[in-house]
Structure formats: structure tokens, C-alpha cells
Amino acid sequence: MADLVIDTRRVNETPILDVTGEVDSYNAPRLRERMVALIDEGPRVLIINMTGVEYIDSTGLGTLVAALKRATERGGTLSIICPNEQIFKVFHITGLVKVFPIHKDEQSALAAGPGMPSAAAVA
């Protein structure tokens, strides 16, 4: 089991969570706590940088979906940076590419701002 490391930083007031390791049933509650805290602060956009994620299971996906729901209820959104093809494949197979704005890099995630997925942002 790989440890989960979550670092928080801001770029132009936009919070970015840099996530490294495995997002699974054991580690997902820590990620949930961090996302909820940032969402409740009220940022319009929260970006989850999954560049360092090696594995994500259904609990991890559910945690992201719950955070997106919470952000949306508060007038915000949650975007994901996911250049890892294996992790992106999980989002694609589960249909979550239609739910999350998913970007290949930080620059495109920041440039997109709030909003739903688009053909340019996904894949």
C-alpha cells in the first residue's frame, strides 16, 4: 500500500491539491477532509492535481464525485489534472470524463477556469 501525500498550494488564489500515491478506501478520507475544508472556504474553483497518483479505486472516485457535488452546491467546481493514461482510463471507463473537467496539465486547468468538461479539456 502506497502512502498518500496531499500538498496544498495556491496559484492566483486558486487552490490546487497536489495528490501523490494511492487514492483508495484507506486513504480517501484524508483527501475528502482536505477537499471539504477548501470547498467550504469558498473558492470558485478547486483543482486536484493527480499527476502523482499511481492508483485510484471506487472509493477514491466516489470521494471526488462527492467533493464535486459539494462544490457545485456552493456555486463552484472541481477540476482534475490527470496526465497519467492509466488513471485517465479509469475516469473514461466509469464515464466520469463527462462529469469532471479533466486536463492534461496545470496550465490548461488554470486557463479553463470554472466549467464543465469540453472536448479540448478532456483527453
Image (spheres, helix red, strand yellow):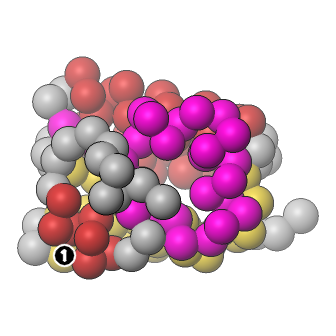
Residue at image point 82% right, 69% down: 2
> Is 52 drawn above or below residue 98 in the view shown?
below
Q: Is residue 6 visible?
A: no
Q: How many marks?
A: 1
User: In which image quadrant can residue 120 be found?
Assistant: bottom left
Point out the residue furthest to the front here: 119
| Residue 87: percent from left, percent from top | 67, 59
Q: Residue 94 or 53: which is nearer the viewer?
A: 94
| Residue 5: percent from left, percent from top | 61, 71
User: In which image quadrant can residue 88 be found?
Assistant: bottom right
- 122 relative position to 43: left or right: right
Point out the residue furthest to the left here: 12
> Is 56 drawn above or below residue 8 in the view shown?
above
- 91 relative position to 107: left or right: right
Asked whether residue 77 is drawn in magenta, I would say: yes
Residue at image point 52% right, 65% down: 82
Residue at image point 20% right, 42% down: 115
Residue at image point 69% right, 40% down: 93
- 75 relative position to 83: left or right: left
Q: Residue 21 or 88: which is nearer the viewer?
A: 88
> Is 77 drawn above or below residue 15 in the view shown?
above
| Residue 71: percent from left, percent from top | 28, 34
Q: Residue 84 or 119: which is nearer the viewer?
A: 119
User: Crowding near pointer 1: few (<14 within 10 Å), some, many (20+)?
Assistant: few
- 1 relative position to 40: left or right: right
Report which residue position mark 1 lands on: 11
Identify the element where label 1 is drawn.
strand
Chain part drawn in magenta: 76-103
Point out the residue furthest to the right here: 1
Asked whether residue 96 is drawn in magenta, I would say: yes
